[in-house]
Image (spheres, grey):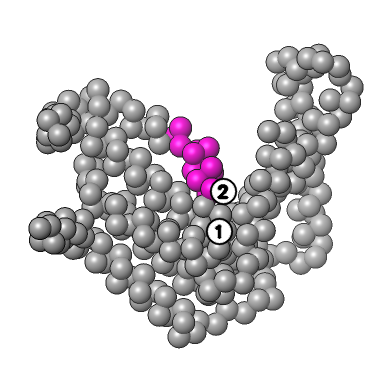
Amino acid sequence: MTFDERYFAVGRLDRLSYGQTLIHRLDPRVKVVATLLFLVTVISFPPHEIAGLLPFFLFPVLLLTLGGIPAGFILRKIVFVSPFALMIGIFNPVLDTRTVTVLAGLPISAGWLSFLSILLKFVLTTGAALLLVATTSFPGICHALRRLGFPSLFVSQLLFLYRYLFVLAEEAMRMTRARDMRTFGKRGLGLAVFVRIVGVLFLRTVDRAERIYAAMLSRGFQGDIPTLRRFRISFRDMAFLAAATILLGAFKFYPVTEGIGRLAQGLRP
């Protein structure tokens, strides 16, 4: 994959947020609160829980379906950052070898359970965060956080960080193209050239940041970023939040997988 393709793949989340589905039309504050409740509920499960986390996949699946978000695109993003979760839990099976259950005649250690639990929590939380951005847009999330009472400095820093990642990527793309035009074959791909490119990119970034900040101050910037969009919570928004809260509460405090297993055994002839 070329640098250009990687750059535009980053912006695809924002392009997906311009949809007109039911999920896209919900108030951003409601979606932020529902996602935060989902994240807190998933993380609150004990480290060796597996079966209790499986019903929570219903939440991102519903968002994918109702929001018209390509499942393959979200899965590729999750797989791309999955090495972080693998590095966190890869040593658990070695450090915790206590046998806690036997499955099909094979002893399962507590380390393997905690490792699988980490992976499930990672997939659920990362997928929910990506779907929030894909159905709301990152600026919409920042404005929703501001309306929910988060400090303006924190929200402004988040918004600047996200916006100028694209500026930095565009500058790096121009420098990469310039290097490719001045080299042939594998020349210019060494570590020394890479270090010089990173240094020049850093200097250009600092210079642009100073110019942008001076321009913002000359236009009356005082630490907060206003928006022309006005949020209004409707009955549909409250119904969505209430349904999400009830669903998460049921998955948290009721053993759904155990109930499904008992029902399947009762229907078995």
Q: Amino acid at mark 1?
A: Ile
| Left or right of 140, for residue 65 | left
| Left or right of 111, for residue 82 | right
Q: Amino acid at mark 2?
A: Phe
In the image, what residue occupies the spot 35% across and 74% down?
243
| Left or right of 245, for residue 93 | left
Q: Which residues are magenta?
A: 72-84
Instruction: Name the mark on residue 128.
Output: none
Residue placed under numbered mark 1 in the picture: 69
* x and y percentages locating residue 205 in the rendered image: 75, 40
Nearest the camera: 145 or 127? 127
Residue placed under numbered mark 2 in the picture: 73
Callouts 2 and 1 close, C-beta under 8 Å: yes
* x and y percentages locating residue 181 in the rendered image: 89, 26
Residue at the extreme bottom: 235
Query: Is residue 193 highlighted in magenta?
Result: no
Note whether 6 is above or below 61 in the view shown.
above
- Determine if residue 156 is in view: no
Nearest the camera: 164 or 264? 264
Note whether 205 is above or below 259 in the view shown.
above
* x and y percentages locating residue 218 in the rendered image: 81, 62
